[in-house]
Structure formats: structure tokens, C-alpha cells
């Protein structure tokens, strides 16, 4: 990301944040038990962090996707958006929390096909939705539905794209440093 601007706004903390930024960080602490570096930077625009946390929580609770499927969606989006931070964070969550198949995690990180046909269809549809800016063809939707998903899942993927775009883009402009808990899953876009 050598050509990407680097914003100099300081990381916020529970001690330094005020008003809505502090409230958003308090919410983050309740939801994830820590203040990730990403959240500390996003808190400079409280609406950004609030929107992210709200949408992320709704996707986690109401999307109808399993925990492993949610990670496939988040990893597919973050891979297309080339977000080193989210690729590392969601790789760790996929492995340690969501019990996503190791082959699926590796495939998403390496931009290779997933062995499991349903997860492969989910990743392909998600990737296509990001790359096409939300313009699936009838054939794209029918293939997704044939894999065992419903039309509402299309909308839930749109929610996930919105949420991950907020975090991916914020991480780009902050060049967010990985938290220690994600370092074992560090990822960098392979250079051609």
C-alpha cells in the first residue's frame, strides 16, 4: 500500500475518547472484549465506528449464515478489497472461533477454490457481488440459490459488503497495525 495516503489521526482509547467516540468504544469493548486497533482509529469518526458495530452485530446475529459461512463472506470481501488487517483478523476468528474448515480459510487467503461446494458457491457469489458493485446476473443468483441459499442471503451479503467496506477502507487509510492476537494470521497481498 505504498501509494495509499496515511491519515495521522491518533488512535482513540477508553481513556482519551469523549462523547460518542467513547460510547462507541464502550460498545466495542462489550461486543468483543477488547478495543482492536481498527476500532481505535475508526473512533475518530464516531458515526463510522457506530455504523460498523451496528451492522456487524446485525449480520452476526440475523444473517441466517452459520459462523463459518459468515467468515467466508468476510474473508471473500476483504480479499477483493485487499485489506491486510481484516484478512488476518478474520482468518484468526475463522480458525479459533467459527471453526471454518482450514482448507476454506487457506483457499480464501490464497485466492484458490474452496473444496466444499456450498462454501465455494458462497465465496464466489460474494466476490462477484463486490467486483460487480452489486450487479449480479440472473445466472449468478440462480447458481447461488442452487447451492442452498435463499434470496434473503443476497441482501445479507450486501449488508456484509457495507460493513466490511467501512473497515477495509478505514484500514487502508490508517495502515492499521495488526493487534497481537492477529499477528499469527498476518496476510499480505501477493505482489505480481
Image (cartoon, grey):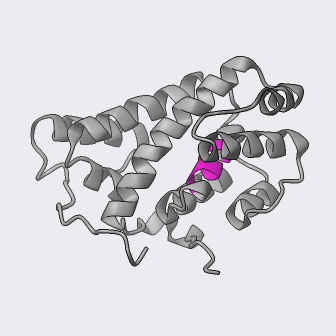
Name the dominant secondary structure of the magenta segment. helix
Residue 124 in view of the camera: yes
Q: Quadrant of residue 113?
A: bottom right
Q: Quadrant of residue 149?
A: top right
Residue 22 is left or right of residue 42, and the answer is left
Residue 36 in view of the camera: no
Q: Position of residue 34 (x, y in %)?
A: 36, 50
Residue at image point 46% right, 45% down? 165
Q: Position of residue 189 (x, y in %)?
A: 59, 72
Residues 121 and 182: in front is: 121
Residue 63 vertical placement versus 90 (above, below): above
Q: Position of residue 76 (x, y in %)?
A: 65, 50
Residue 142 vertical placement versus 42 (above, below): above
Residue 54 is left or right of residue 94, and the answer is left
Residue 62 is left or right of residue 117, and the answer is left
Residue at image point 30% right, 40% down? 49
The span shown in magenta is: 72-78
Amino acid at each position: 500500500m505504498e501509494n495509499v495516503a496515511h491519515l495521522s489521526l491518533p488512535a482513540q482509547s477508553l481513556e482519551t475518547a469523549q462523547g460518542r467516540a467513547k460510547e462507541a468504544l464502550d460498545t466495542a469493548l462489550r461486543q468483543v472484549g477488547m478495543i482492536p486497533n481498527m476500532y481505535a482509529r475508526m473512533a475518530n469518526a464516531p458515526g463510522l465506528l457506530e455504523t460498523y458495530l451496528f451492522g456487524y452485530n446485525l449480520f452476526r446475529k440475523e444473517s441466517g449464515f452459520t459462523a463459518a459461512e459468515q467468515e467466508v463472506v468476510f474473508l471473500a470481501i476483504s480479499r477483493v478489497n485487499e485489506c491486510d488487517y481484516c484478512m488476518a483478523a478474520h482468518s484468526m476468528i475463522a480458525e479459533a472461533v467459527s471453526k471454518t474448515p482450514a482448507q476454506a480459510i487457506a483457499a480464501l487467503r490464497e485466492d484458490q477454490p474452496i473444496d466444499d461446494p456450498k462454501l465455494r458457491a458462497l465465496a464466489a457469489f460474494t466476490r462477484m457481488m463486490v467486483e460487480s458493485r452489486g450487479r449480479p446476473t440472473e445466472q449468478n443468483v440462480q447458481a447461488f440459490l442452487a447451492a442452498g441459499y435463499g434470496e434473503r442471503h443476497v441482501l445479507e451479503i450486501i449488508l456484509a459488503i457495507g460493513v466490511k467496506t467501512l473497515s477495509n477502507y478505514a484500514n487502508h487509510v490508517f495502515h492499521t497495525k495488526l493487534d497481537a492476537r492477529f499477528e499469527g494470521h498476518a496476510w499480505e497481498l501477493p505482489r505480481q
